Image (tube, rainbow, N blue to C red):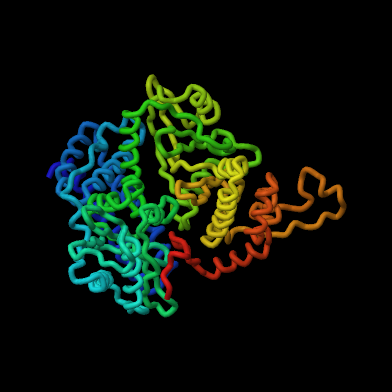
Amino acid sequence: MSNTSEIALQILNAFIEYRQIFQSIAREAKDCFEQSQWRQLQDISSRRIDLYALKVREVANQISVQAVSGWRWSEVKKEYAALVAVRADTELAETFFNSVYSRIEGDHPSAQAQLFIPRERIKHSGSRGVYRQYLLSSGIYNMLRSMLDDCGFNIGWENRRRDICNLMRYMREQWVEGAEKGSQLASDNTVDVIHSLFFRNKAAYLVGRLNREGKQSPFVIALLLNEEGKLYVDTAVSHPDQVSVIFSFTRAYFLVDAEAPVQFIEFLHQLIPLKSRAELYNSIGFYKQGKAEFYRDFMKHLSESDDVFCPAEGIKGMVMTVFTLPSYPVVFKIIKDRFSSSKQVSRAVVKDRYALVKHHDRAGRLADTQEFVNLQLPLARFDPELLTELEAIAGSSVESTDDQLLIKHVWVERRMTPLNMYLQEALQQENEEQLFHGINEFGKCIKELAAANIFAGDMLFKNFGVTRHGRIVFYDYDEIMYLTACNFRHIPEAMYPEQELADEPWYSVGPADVFPEEFNLLTACDRKIRKLFNELHSELLTVEWWQKVQKQVEEGDIVDLYPYRRHQRFER
């Protein structure tokens, strides 16, 4: 065997090992769920995130000592391509090769000649192999019973007959359009359900679709455990927007056994076409493949559009400079060379905090990001004022060539409407419903992050965004910290009036000290906002509330945070 063949095989074996461990972690999730081991479920989810980089680093270190020259890399790539062509996860294998090559040769554009270039999607014969199909000819009840039996759980049900009746009622109400309630679905209708269960937090999900009259309707069934460890169906969701929220970029990645990822993604994309394939790869834990898919799609979009990059809307940040392409729904975030004097953080700390969010349960309230090194974008597509601004405040991170702007380090994140602008619009238009929704969701966001052991730090409205589904999400991570690391304090009383009027506080403030009474300043901008906030979330201004949640987290409580509304849950 030639040296190039050996290296290609080395990379493939490392990839196979990565995939085997990835799949074993997904299967371990089922055991954790059945035994109510919620903390362990979070731990293996976090461990899986590190797995890819670990395996890339290991094989790259093995190969680098063999001193592969540039011309031989083309032979390695050719050998490797032949080895992975017949695999069901070819697209993942190619991305893995790219990661190993970049680790050895560097991420600079001049060293990227041997990468697998993003191309048109690998063609497979549909997604038939990833789902089971059920016929309604034997009746809805029997079909649902078979569906639940096929989950393969090793634990009992709280009341399976009740759950099936709840699902039957839901199906008839949601899927029999234009017909009276109680009418039957046609016997020739079919239901497809993905073989693998989706695990996240304290829930397991069945994901599938109804095939009816040439149309496909998505659905997700949420399964939970009661206090005795018995299974029950908590709810079903079938509206495309609600299904999309379950796969949101603001939530932790699912643990799911996806043997043929491209077929898996094709099935999911048919259910929720508004979700990009990049987001779907991310949602099931293949975030490196999600990054590759994003890059391919974004480059394609650039070639088919002509608008220019411009500053993102909202108040300019003190740590990050943010820009966007109006025709594409993401923002690009670059660390500034110098921070505002009020920010006691470094570049390394900012990177660490973005990594923290990547590994932590995002609880539906933190935006996922993709990190890029040496990203090249066409120079002609940049607004001149933006280009001048980038060179002035982030010059160490950008470099211009004749026709490209090289960005040495950048995060890409889903674009949202800044909450301060959302609330300002509500005030200007006297939209009481929008104002109520914004303030109520803002408070809920802070509370749910706290329950997930996250203290947002800088909680100004400008650091929160509103998604297209109306959820409030935190996206400024430079001051984020674990709730358990905070020291919540009352503001000491001033000894004399002049102290209260001074520019500096009259009391000592440690690096982890937090004074909830100061949160009043968040809502001091407007009387209506302040009144609403105090009516809905006044407990956030008290030390006692924060200390109570802090104690719950320290004692190991994992709060139930599900991606659907309480009113959607079935009666038990």
Q: How many marks?
A: 0
Report if residue 142 is visible in the image.
yes
Q: Residue at x 81, y 49 (%)?
A: 500
Q: Which quadrant is home to the N terminus?
A: top left
Q: Residue at x 24, y 43 (%)?
A: 94
Residue 85 drawn at (x, y percent): 16, 45
Residue 133 drawn at (x, y percent): 20, 63
Whether 531 is drawn above or below 206: the answer is: above
Asked whether 344 or 220 is in front, the reply is 220
Whether 316 is drawn above or below 206: the answer is: above
Q: Residue at x 35, y 77 (%)?
A: 162
Determine the image quadrant of residue 201. bottom left
Report if residue 513 is visible in the image.
no
Asked whether 104 or 350 is in front, the reply is 350
Determine the image quadrant of residue 410. top left
Q: Which quadrant is home to the C terminus?
A: bottom left
Asked whether 474 or 479 is in front, the reply is 474
Task: Classify residue 107 as left or right of residue 489.
Answer: left
Residue 53 drawn at (x, y percent): 35, 49
Q: Residue furthest left?
A: 1
Whether 304 is drawn above or below 502: the answer is: above
Residue 67 drawn at (x, y percent): 26, 38
